[in-house]
Image (cartoon, grey):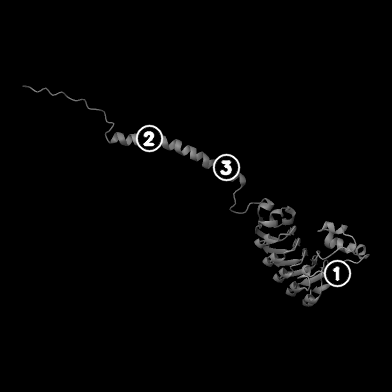
Amino acid sequence: MLRVLRNNSITGPIPKGISKLSIRHILALSNNDLVGRIPTEMGQLKRMVNSLETPSTSSYIPDGFFPRFLGNLTHLIVNWKKSFVSLPAGANLDIYVLLDLSGNHLSGKIPTSIGDLKSIKLFNLPHNNLSGNIPSSFANLEHVETLDLSHNKLSGSIPESLAKLHQLAVLDVSNNQLKGRLPVGGQMYTMNILSYYANNSGLCGIQIQQPCPGDQQPGEAIKEEEKQQEFSWIGPGIGFPVGFVFTVLIVYMSGYLSPLTPHRHIIRRT
């Protein structure tokens, strides 16, 4: 079941009863006037939780439907999944599970229950007023490929657990208030597009070539190593002559090297 309600000037909060909808693939509520918090119940959306495990014939686009629907899908999917535009009529949509809440006035924290939507492939939340931390439960979105949280008021650090998302291809957290070290490991090593982290003055890490506090610059590390090597040569060079002089001085003072006193010949008179 596809629910595409974007660009409809829908107002008010997202109803808690949304969890009762049997939405299999796409819930698109972008570019409306939705306000308030994202309901915790959204993490209980039926079939979005397990749609990848329960495929059925209802996931196929009927012949003749795809061309008419492409106009809406272009904004929702094609920008992120370029290959989708080439899919023929009758292609399987089961792998494209999308939740798009972008371009609204949603506020408050992102509910941790969103992490229960394990089948979701694309999750878009940009251009809202969301605040608080990025939930560590996002690490449970094991099939997510695109996670767009840009243009909000999110703070804190990016959870280290996101390194577990082995299918993640796009992580856009630009234009927030995030800080701290970017996670490393897994797919996070490939997340090195600077624009996806732009306008977060507190972020640092190898992906954006910004050292974190306490990190050594590569040049500084080399200089420090050269200094240590130089000292390892200079140290013995200075120590040996100083030690030799000091040893000679001690021996001299102990009398071993004192000038020999000439022996006086005593003439005994008989």
Query: What residue lies at 68% left-to-right and 61% top-to-bottom?
Result: 164
Residue 5: x and y in percent read: 85, 69
Real-space CA distance between mark 1 and mark 2, rounded to the nearest whole angstrom: 92 Å
- Asked if disc 1 and disc 3 are in contact, CB closer than 8 Å, the reply is no
The nearer-to-camera label among 1 and 3 is 1
Q: Counting residues from the N terminus, which is met first, the one under dot 1 or under dot 3?
A: 1
Quarter of the image with the N terminus in it: bottom right
Real-space CA distance between mark 1 and mark 3, rounded to the nearest whole angstrom: 64 Å
Real-space CA distance between mark 2 and mark 3, rounded to the nearest whole angstrom: 32 Å
Q: Which residue is mark 1?
A: 57
Query: What residue lies at 69% left-to-right and 64% top-to-bottom?
Result: 139
Could you say which is closer to the camera, residue 160 or residue 200?
160
Q: Is residue 1 left or right of residue 192?
A: right
Residue 269: x and y in percent read: 7, 22
Residue 80: x and y in percent read: 81, 58
Q: Which numbered tag is attached to residue 188?
A: none
Q: Which residue is mark 3?
A: 223
Could you say which is closer to the camera, residue 5 or residue 67?
67
User: Looking at the picture, does residue 188 appear above or below residue 259?
Assistant: below
Q: Tag 2, which secondary structure?
A: helix
| Circle 3: residue type | Lys
Q: Tag 1, which secondary structure?
A: helix
Q: Counting residues from the N terminus, which is met first, the one under dot 1 or under dot 2?
A: 1
- Mark 3 crowdedness (10 Å alpha carbons): few <14, some 14-19, many ≥20: few
Q: Is residue 226 left or right of residue 117?
A: left
Q: Which residue is mark 2?
A: 244
- Mark 2 crowdedness (10 Å alpha carbons): few <14, some 14-19, many ≥20: few
Q: Is residue 186 visible?
A: yes
